Amino acid sequence: MSLALAFRDVGKRFGETRVLEAFDLEVPSGEKLAIIGPSGSGKSTVLRIAMALEGIDTGRVELMGETLWEGTRRPPERELRRLRLQAGMVFQHFNLFPHMSVLENIWRAPVDVAGIGREEAETRARELLSRVGLAERAEAMPDQLSGGQKQRVAIARALAMRPPVMLFDEVTSALDPEMVGEVLGVLRDLADQGGITMLLVTHEMQFAAEIADRVVFMDGGRVVEDGPPSQVIGAPVEPRTRAFLASVLRGADVRAD
Amino acid sequence: MTDSLAMLPLLLEGLRLTLQITVLAAVLALVLAIVAGLARSYAPRPLAWLAATYVEIFRGTSALIQLFWFFFALPLLGVELGAFVTAVLVLGLNSGAYGAEVVRGAIGAVPRGQWEAATSLGYGRLGALRRVVFPQAALAMVPPAGNLAIELLKNTALVSMITLSDLTFRAQILRAETLRTVEIFILVLVLYYLAARFITHGMGRLERHLARGRDHGGLAP
Ligand SMILES: Nc1ncnc2c1ncn2[C@@H]1O[C@H](COP(=O)(O)OP(=O)(O)OP(=O)(O)O)[C@@H](O)[C@H]1O
Ligand SMILES: [Mg+2]
């Protein structure tokens, strides 16, 4: 099976802080991978490196079979832009474009970046909006939406570029509890539909256990435990994984952000 | 009273020149502010340095001295621009230097998440700036730009010192001829005030136009 994403012995630091150390991760095409771990363990950094928002210091990262990062070498901007089309990202705080309508948020990049005709892009945008259950909010401005609606638009916006790999960074952490369900529902549909490689950084253990093919527990910039949800979440072997899950369960209704 | 109204056409003649200089200098300032403001943050080294130097020089010296320098000193170096062109050029350069800082500040205040969202969708730096970041920053620029435009209007009074018959210059002439200082300067104050109100009003409309559909003025949350 071909790999959508591969981290090979990656090291990454911010100044004196070592964020990733000897980090290895292979994600086969089509896999739904959940990444869990305590705050500061480097989960977001892994996604940001895969999205080429952040470089690395040592090792190598491959995206859809092509080298994205190799040591400190930075590919030319044009090359980076081409490689970024292989991945899409959804952020914790949505980052919708507040000066564009919901619909334009979705069709704009396909027109500007992928060179798709305006009409076709709008049709596709409307399809995506109905897929995330927001067909009737097409003309609204982002400010007029609830958090859960914003996040669903953000997912549609990323999907509009049809990337083979989708990266989700704690996409429900900034939401009021009553809105978490609607966003997880969209993710579940996406996972069920298949075809897309999904990396989900999440604190929703139940959800991760339900939709992920595989779960990785990270701590201190390394993969500590890696296996099917039934193992990593259901019956963890590593003491650190157990300690983490215990702390998450204790705070289950004090939502971790 | 009828006599003071008789002075109005002359003053209005001066107002016309004042407004001409204001508008032309404002257009020049707008272009310079955007170019220099962007260059300081996003252009290659030498250009960024050039932009920074321009801003520092024109903010660090007085507008009157700048006018004198361009009007009296430059011709000695063989460059003769004429009073009107000098006025527009100097006031535009001066205002543009302040405007460049407004542009730079507003762009810097757009949250990093907006850049990252655009980048992750495949936009390059220029595309992200043009389509995502600048339109949001533009909204935040309008109120300070309005203040600068009013500053510029008031600064045009300086051009009376380089032989131009603007509103202030006409007032001085009339005062010398008629000695009716109080009435003349009340009229002049009212005319400047009305012109300033007009700018404020226009900027308010522009801001509302740019902010359509958005709750919080200015920047993304
Ligand atoms: N731009 C940056 N500059 C400096 N340090 C950073 C930067 N980004 C992340 N870090 C540091 O790197 C470490 C890992 O950060 P990262 O955001 O990847 O963790 P995380 O696992 O996503 O945590 P959380 O669950 O809180 O989101 C943290 O110690 C963080 O402070
Ligand atoms: Mg994080």
Image (tube, helix red, strand yellow):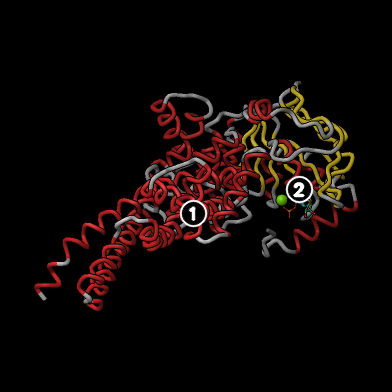
Per the image, the residue denoted by label 1 is B94
* Figure quadrant of the N terminus of chain B: bottom left
Question: Which one is in front, B72 or A67?
Answer: B72
Instruction: Determine if the C-beta at disc 2 is less than 8 A from ligand 1.
Output: no
Tally of marks: 2
Relative to residue A72, is residue B117 drawn left or right?
A: left
Question: Where residue B40 appears, x then y in whole percent?
Answer: 61, 46
> For the residue carrying disc 1, how many other residues have a C-alpha within 10 Å: few (<14), some (14-19), or many (20+)?
many
Rendered residue at 36%/48% (across/down): B84
- Residue farthest along the bottom direction in this orientation: B182
Question: Where residue A54 appears, x then y in whole percent?
Answer: 73, 40
> For the residue carrying disc 2, how many other residues have a C-alpha within 10 Å: few (<14), some (14-19), or many (20+)?
many
Relative to residue A237, is residue A125 drawn left or right?
A: left
* Figure quadrant of the C terminus of chain B: bottom right
Find residue A36 and name its label.
Answer: 2
Residue A59's quadrant in the figure? top right
Q: Amino acid at mark 2?
A: Ile
What is the chain letter for disc 2?
A
Question: Where residue B22 appears, x then y in whole percent?
Answer: 35, 54
Rendered residue at 29%/71% (across/down): B189
Q: Amino acid at mark 1?
A: Asn
C-alpha distance separating marks 2 and 1: 55 Å
Question: Which one is in front, B63 or B209?
Answer: B63
- Residue farthest along the left direction in this orientation: B2
Question: Where residue A171 appears, x then y in whole percent?
Answer: 62, 48
